[in-house]
Image (cartoon, rainbow, N blue to C red):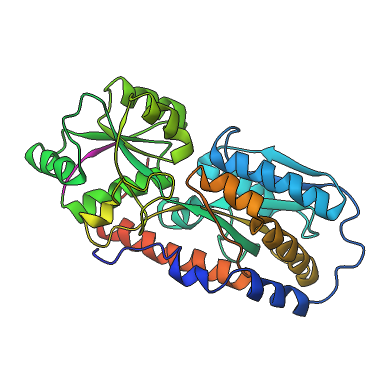
Amino acid sequence: MRAIRTLTTAVLAATLAVPALAWAQAAGSADGYPKKAIHIIVPYTAGAINDVLARRVGAKLSEALKQPVIVENRPGGGTAIGTEYVARAAPDGYTLLQIAASHSINPSLVPDLPYDSIKDFSFITLAATSPYVLIVAPALPVKTVADLVAMAKAKPGALSFSSTGNGGTAHMMGELLNSLGGVKTLHIPYKGGAQATTDLVSNQVQFSFSTYTGAQSFIKANRVRPIATTGAKRMSALPDLPTIGETLPGYDAAGWWGYAAPAGTPPAIVAKLNQELVKILQTPEMKETFSAEGVEMLGTTPDAFKQHIQREMGVWGKLVKDANITVN
């Protein structure tokens, strides 16, 4: 398990704005599109960073395309409800999906998914990526990843970590820590980040993985203690905090978000959406706004995004198999 990686930095850096623009120019014309409102489906509850991203991007896309862009939250089923809704929608470019890392985790964990994570979608662009923050309860006497691993080894099964749900990104980050650290800790799933962090603050669980957006107010108020971040490199918003990989080589995991449409969406429409979204994602305003939240804006070709998802499916599928991870 030493080489578990999400490959969201160096590989993607070579597939940003210029290749995306060239691909869009080669895919044909989308004359007349769009003629009505576009809906972006977010398969999560409102308020989290994925929702904020969708609404910021949606507002800019509306300006660029001169049509309303409506963001709809359709949570449930570990993102399967909203994702299936888009998979079954008309492939006309008017129903889009904002997908996240769970899209590449679900195939290995969720039996009988009502859609195929690759075949049922036309991928548009990988929009952004962000490492998570490993935070611990205030009463837990650990200050580093090494401390946490040592305590977990001394007390197998005694430490627990919270997440936003079975099979989600935070859950898998904890399982990756178990695997690479050679420890056993107990996963406690919640239905959202708020309760997961609240129980951490009250010492009901001992550690958690959170987006920086979700954790920053608790960190600033000293209600939780950050000890590391999950990505391959240090987070720009927390430059003094080490990565988990600095203690456990090979640990590299990050949240990410991107856009897709139903399979069969005309290539010219996919190209137009790709071109406009990449322009939006690469603006100084968007980069600066989300950098403060620990998020790196990207913008790739459709093919690069598809390859990214396929790589991640392989990474998480291997972890699930090797560690015998199941969800109830």
Please state if 204 lies on the left or on the right of 85 as rendered: left
Residue 298 percent location from the top left of the image: 57, 60
Quarter holding the C terminus is top left
Residue 299 percent location from the top left of the image: 61, 63
Residue 163 belongs to the span the image colors magenta: no
Find the magenta span and give its range. 183-187
- Regarding residue 262, the answer to whether it shows in the image is no
In this rendering, is residue 258 above or below 199? below
In this rendering, is residue 225 above or below 167? above
Residue appearing at x 60%, y 72% in the figure: 303
Please state if 20 lies on the left or on the right of 234 as rendered: right
Q: Which residue is more in the foreground, 7 or 174?
A: 7
In this rendering, is residue 130 above or below 201? below
Residue 277 percent location from the top left of the image: 70, 59
Q: Which residue is more in the foreground, 235 or 305?
A: 235
- Regarding residue 125, the answer to whether it shows in the image is yes
Quarter holding the N terminus is bottom left
Residue 212 percent location from the top left of the image: 44, 40
